[in-house]
Image (tube, rainbow, N blue to C red):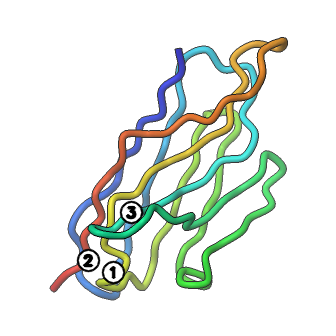
Amino acid sequence: QVQLVESGGGLVQPGGSLRLSCAASGSIFSMNDMGWYRQAPGKQRELVAGITRGGSTDYADSVKGRFTISRDNARNTVYLQMDSLKPEDTAVYYCNAEIRSRPTYPSRNYWGQGTQVTVSS
């Protein structure tokens, strides 16, 4: 059994910062690509940022230069530092990870439960 638990969401004023964390627990042999997605009301879920096991990163154009994704492989944790937040960043943010539970098992995609980020004055 694998679980992803996000934390760090909340209410912040425009221009402010938040740091999201996502910790994986359970039966984990290896973690490959990890990422953060978000879904605003009435919109489709979209990729915000992704990071490979080796640390290569990719960002949505809308967050480049403002958000930074990082990971701690020893702690099975991925982070999203969000700076210069805008009202349009308001959404539920979800963590995603590709995890192999056993050496002989295929990798599977897991999702966290989501954490609300609201940017408003």
Q: Earlier in the sequence, mark 1 or mark 3?
A: 1
Q: Residues under labels 1 and 3: Cα distance?
A: 20 Å
- The image shows residue 64 at horizontal and vertical percentages of 61, 82
- The image shows residue 22 at horizontal and vertical percentages of 48, 43
Task: Identify the residue position indicated by label 2 in the image.
Answer: 119
Residue 48 as seen in the image, left or right of residue 18 = right
Amino acid at the residue labelled 3: Gln
Task: Report helix, strand or loop for mark 3.
Answer: strand
Q: Earlier in the sequence, mark 3 or mark 2?
A: 3
- The image shows residue 42 at horizontal and vertical percentages of 29, 69
Q: Are marks 2 and 1 in contact (CB under 8 Å)?
A: yes
Task: Report helix, strand or loop for mark 1.
Answer: loop
Outermost left residue: 121
Q: Write the residue at 52% across / 61% down.
A: 80
Q: Write the residue at 34% across / 53% down.
A: 8
Q: Residues under labels 3 and 2: Cα distance?
A: 14 Å
Q: Residues within 10 Å of mark 2 (few under 14, many from 20)?
A: many
Amino acid at the residue labelled 2: Val
Q: Are marks 3 and 2 in contact (CB under 8 Å)?
A: no
Hey, which quadrant is residue 20 in on the image? bottom left
Q: Write the residue at 66% across / 44% down.
A: 72
Q: Which mark is residue 39?
A: 3
Q: Write the residue at 51% across / 65% down.
A: 46
Task: Report helix, strand or loop for mark 2.
Answer: strand
Amino acid at the residue labelled 1: Gly
Hey, which quadrant is residue 107 in on the image? top right
Task: Identify the residue position indicated by label 1 in the image.
Answer: 16
Q: Earlier in the sequence, mark 2 or mark 1?
A: 1
Residue 97 as seen in the image, left or right of residue 10 = right
Which quadrant does the C terminus fall into? Answer: bottom left
Name the one closer to the observer, 81 or 64: 64
